[in-house]
Image (cartoon, grey):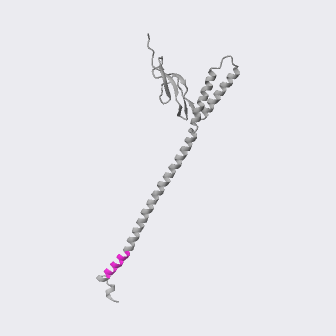
């Protein structure tokens, strides 16, 4: 055995070991760099997946909401048109002469009542008007008149107003109080 290869104090021996260590460090550093690169790519792809998943989840929620609203408000135009029919039936009942058969009048009144009940089942609600404070979101002012009621209070309803599931379908056309009449 030669002392040259076995002596740890020999500078050649140490430098050979250092060269060997640095050669193995280079592939390790390269592999560590590649691992870090792949981890970063994985993290980026994971984030893309999470964003895509969140977008799809939001899309599903939005689609359910839109479908629900379409079912809830989809017949809004039909309901608005049917209100004219209800108005005409109510006017007909009001103008039935006293000489008409009571059974005929009762039959028409029941038809109007059934019509109103059917609309209510579908979410159409009458807007309360008489004696209530004027609300520009629900009422359309057609005029003012002196009254014992406070100013801004609805005194009469000219055309009934309705909502559909809380959304205005037709405003109530009303006359409101201008306040206490001036005494002469």
Residue 112 location, x and y as percent? 64, 27
Q: Is residue 102 above or below residue 35?
A: above
| Residue at 41%, 65% in the rendered image | 37
Residue 85 location, x and y as percent? 61, 29
Q: Is residue 22 magenta?
A: yes
| Residue at 66%, 26% in the rendered image | 110
Q: Is residue 21 above or below residue 62?
A: below
Which residue is nearer to you in this view: 142 or 10? 142
Q: Quadrant of the C terminus?
A: top left
Count the marks: 0
Residue 31 location, x and y as percent? 41, 70
| Residue at 39%, 73% in the rendered image | 27
The quarter of the picture where residue 70 lies is: top right
Which residue is nearer to you in this view: 124 or 89? 89
What residue span does the magenta drawing correspond to?
13-24
| Residue at 42%, 67% in the rendered image | 35
Q: Quadrant of the N terminus?
A: bottom left
Q: Is residue 65 magenta?
A: no
């Amino acid at each position: 055995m030669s002392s040259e290869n076995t002596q740890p104090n020999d500078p050649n021996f140490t430098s050979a070991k250092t060269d060997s260590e640095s050669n193995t460090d280079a592939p390790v550093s390269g592999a560590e760099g590649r691992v870090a690169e792949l981890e970063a790519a994985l993290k980026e792809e994971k984030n893309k997946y999470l964003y895509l998943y969140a977008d799809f989840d939001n899309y599903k929620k939005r689609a359910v909401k839109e479908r629900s609203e379409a079912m809830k408000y989809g017949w809004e135009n039909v309901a608005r048109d049917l209100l004219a029919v209800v108005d005409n039936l109510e006017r007909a009942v009001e103008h039935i002469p006293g000489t008409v058969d009571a059974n005929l009048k009762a039959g028409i009144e029941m038809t109007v009542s059934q019509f109103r009940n059917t609309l209510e089942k579908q979410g159409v609600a009458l807007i309360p008007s008489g004696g209530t404070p004027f609300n520009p979101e629900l009422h359309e002012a057609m005029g003012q008149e002196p009254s014992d009621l406070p100013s801004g209070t609805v005194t009469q309803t000219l055309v009934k107003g309705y909502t559909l599931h809380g959304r205005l379908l037709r405003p109530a056309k009303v006359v409101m109080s201008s306040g206490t009449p001036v005494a002469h």
